[in-house]
């Protein structure tokens, strides 16, 4: 696959053309700059200036996210993120960026993309706090409360009458766990003749122990510390919706609670104790958290993480990665598989 | 190790040449970078993998099979056989070691399939015992490689604009 140059003025020109067609206004794109953090979608910030033929001129602070064909989870589609953000846009108490436009037509800028509102804030990273700086327990807890409340709001959305209904792939509540297992097995190329025994064992275990979902909700799919913005100690936006789907809400609860995101603490995301996390979630949603299902989805979460690491390694080996940090990810496969082994051992 | 040395070195050289070097403005830093790339070019032919990790991994797998086979036979059944010989000469080459470890891993996969097969004739208690032996073998076989892997510095990789 030929690398596409998204660093030059060509991207700006293509984006202006797209925005002009969408808004039927004159458009200029300025101050384009790329953020370096993600290994998946490529993110740019820019100012969009819109004028005529009707309405006052306006200037919007915007984000362009491009589904890099060389990215960690390629190939991408922007539509699920757009559908979910649109469906959730009126959900009370849920800070998310407004989604303006998207396209999965690769002829426009060379890959799927979405344009959203830019929200102020920074990304708190638990591992940064471990390597330096003092932990502010009260500030973490305030963030932890926002973190639970936003998840409860996502899971409380009555999605059936919204654009999110289009996320459905027809999988019944009885089968969503097996469906997710299959999805990540496929990502890791499983089953395969050279499978790592721990991956194969986990796949069989997940298939054998899958339980029906108590209810089907919008599932963020990557709900964790690192995927939200915060400002002045409050969450300002939940980001990174590329894995959004309909499924068992315990999937997000399990993923958020993985030890790998806890910065060496016993707290969910390094922010809030598990018991408090679940109690507040139950209070906000009116739904019981089943610890057995959370544990199952922690195992599925680690399996998913291992599948991503395998995918990253194979992208590097095949020359299909543009980001060398993916090679560093490959070294984390063995520790991840050992943690997977430990969690299966501890399953109720 | 699931990543080849040559693949890793290729990636390093590519990342330095294409992603880092064009952004480096200082002549001194560019000179240092060129030196690093030159050494990377030479390393591939100079490095010899130690076979110790593979030997240790293989010994753990063989010992695990002994315990699993014994338990399965105690239960009155025959375990799935390996698809090739696991025996190894003391002067085995790196590729022979890799090949035997691969045979061992394939057998762990076959035992897993056998154990999870709903038609498996084992009682729940027998299954639980063998399952624990299988999980322990898989876990212990990862330990030699785990000792070699330092923690990833994601903080450094997260970039300057975070």
Image (cartoon, rainbow, N blue to C red):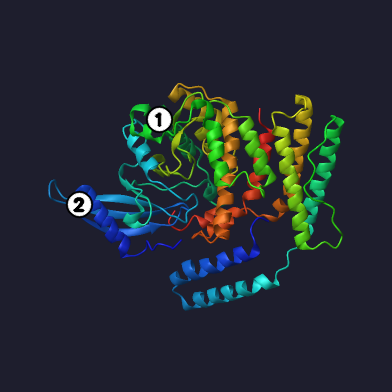
Whether residue A262 is visible here, answered yes or no, is: no
Q: Nearer the viewer, mark 1 or mark 2?
A: 2
Q: Is residue A40 above or below residue B90?
A: above
Please state which of residues B92 and A348 is positioned toward the viewer in this rendering.
B92
Earlier sequence position, callout 1 versus callout 2: 2
Q: Chain of mark 1?
A: A
* Picture residue at 54% right of the left edge, 25% below the top: A212
Which of B93/B145 is in front? B93
Residue bearing mark 2: A50
Location of the C terminus of chain A (image quadrant): top right
Q: Is residue A316 left or right of residue A202?
A: left
Which residue sits at x=56%, y=60%? A318
- Rendering quarter of residue B44: bottom right
Q: Which residue is mark 1?
A: A153
**In the rendered image, residues at marks 1 and 2 fall on the same chain:** yes
Residue A134 in percent (x, y) is at 53, 47
Where residue A292 sits in the image (x, y, percent)? 60, 27
CA–CA distance in space, label 1 to label 2:
33 Å
User: How many C-alpha atoms fall within 10 Å of the one at disc 1: few (<14), some, or many (≥20)?
Assistant: some
Position of residue B23 measured from the top left corner of the image (x, y, whole percent): 44, 69
Report which quarter residue B76 is drawn in.
top right
Residue A29 drawn above or below residue A90: below
Residue A30 visible in the picture: yes
Residue B89: x percent and y percent?
86, 59
Residue A83 tag number = none
Instruction: Tell me the chain of label 2.
Output: A
Mark 2 surroundings: few (<14), some (14-19) or many (≥20) residues within 10 A: many
> Horizontally, is B88 left or right of A69 in the view?
right
Given residues A273 and A178, the one toward you in this image is A178
Callout 1: helix, strand or loop? helix
Q: Determine the image quadrant of residue A267.
A: top right
| Dots 1, 2 in contact, CB < 8 A | no
């Amino acid at each position: 696959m030929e690398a596409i140059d998204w660093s030059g003025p060509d991207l700006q020109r293509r984006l202006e053309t797209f925005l002009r067609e969408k808004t039927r206004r004159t458009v200029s794109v300025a101050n384009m700059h790329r953020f370096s953090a993600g290994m998946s979608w490529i993110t740019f910030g820019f100012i969009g200036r819109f004028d005529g033929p009707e309405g006052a001129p306006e200037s919007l602070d915007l984000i362009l996210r491009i589904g890099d064909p060389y990215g960690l989870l390629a190939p991408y589609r922007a539509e699920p993120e757009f559908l979910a953000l649109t469906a959730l846009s009126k959900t009370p108490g849920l800070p998310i960026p407004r989604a303006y436009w998207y396209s999965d037509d690769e002829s426009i800028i060379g890959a799927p993309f979405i344009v959203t509102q830019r929200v102020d804030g920074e990304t708190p990273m638990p591992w940064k706090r471990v390597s330096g700086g003092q932990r502010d327990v009260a500030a973490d807890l305030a963030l932890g409360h926002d973190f639970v409340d936003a998840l409860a709001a996502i899971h409380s959305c009555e999605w059936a009458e919204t654009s999110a209904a289009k996320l459905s792939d027809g999988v019944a509540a009885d089968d969503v766990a097996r469906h997710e297992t299959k999805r990540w097995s496929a990502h890791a190329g499983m089953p395969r003749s050279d499978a790592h025994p721990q991956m194969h064992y986990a796949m069989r275990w997940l298939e054998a122990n899958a339980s029906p979902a108590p209810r089907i909700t919008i599932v963020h799919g990557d709900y964790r510390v690192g995927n939200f913005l915060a400002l002045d100690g409050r969450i300002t936006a939940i980001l990174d919706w590329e894995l959004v789907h309909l499924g068992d809400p315990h999937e997000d609860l399990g993923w958020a609670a993985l030890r790998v995101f806890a910065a060496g603490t016993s707290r969910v995301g390094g922010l809030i104790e598990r018991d408090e996390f679940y109690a507040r979630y139950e209070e906000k949603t009116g739904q019981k958290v089943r610890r057995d299902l959370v544990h199952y989805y922690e195992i599925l979460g680690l399996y998913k993480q291992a599948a991503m690491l395998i995918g990253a390694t194979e992208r590097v080996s095949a020359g299909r990665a543009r980001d060398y940090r993916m090679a560093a990810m490959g070294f984390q496969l063995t520790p991840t598989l050992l943690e997977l082994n430990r969690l299966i051992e501890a399953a109720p | 190790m699931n990543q080849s040395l040559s693949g890793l070195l290729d990636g390093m050289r590519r990342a330095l040449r294409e992603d880092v070097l064009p952004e480096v403005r200082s002549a001194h830093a560019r000179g240092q970078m060129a030196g690093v790339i030159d050494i990377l070019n030479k390393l591939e032919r100079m490095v010899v993998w130690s076979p110790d990790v593979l030997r240790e991994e293989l010994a753990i797998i063989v010992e695990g099979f002994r315990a699993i086979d014994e338990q399965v036979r105690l239960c009155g059944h025959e375990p799935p056989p390996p698809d090739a010989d696991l025996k190894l000469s003391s002067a085995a080459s790196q590729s022979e070691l890799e090949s035997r470890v691969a045979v061992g891993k394939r057998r762990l996969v076959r035992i897993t399939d056998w154990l999870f097969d709903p038609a498996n004739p084992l009682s729940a208690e027998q299954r639980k015992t063998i399952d624990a032996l299988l999980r322990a073998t898989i876990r212990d076989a990862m330990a030699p490689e785990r000792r070699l892997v330092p923690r990833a510095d994601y903080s450094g990789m997260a970039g300057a604009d975070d």
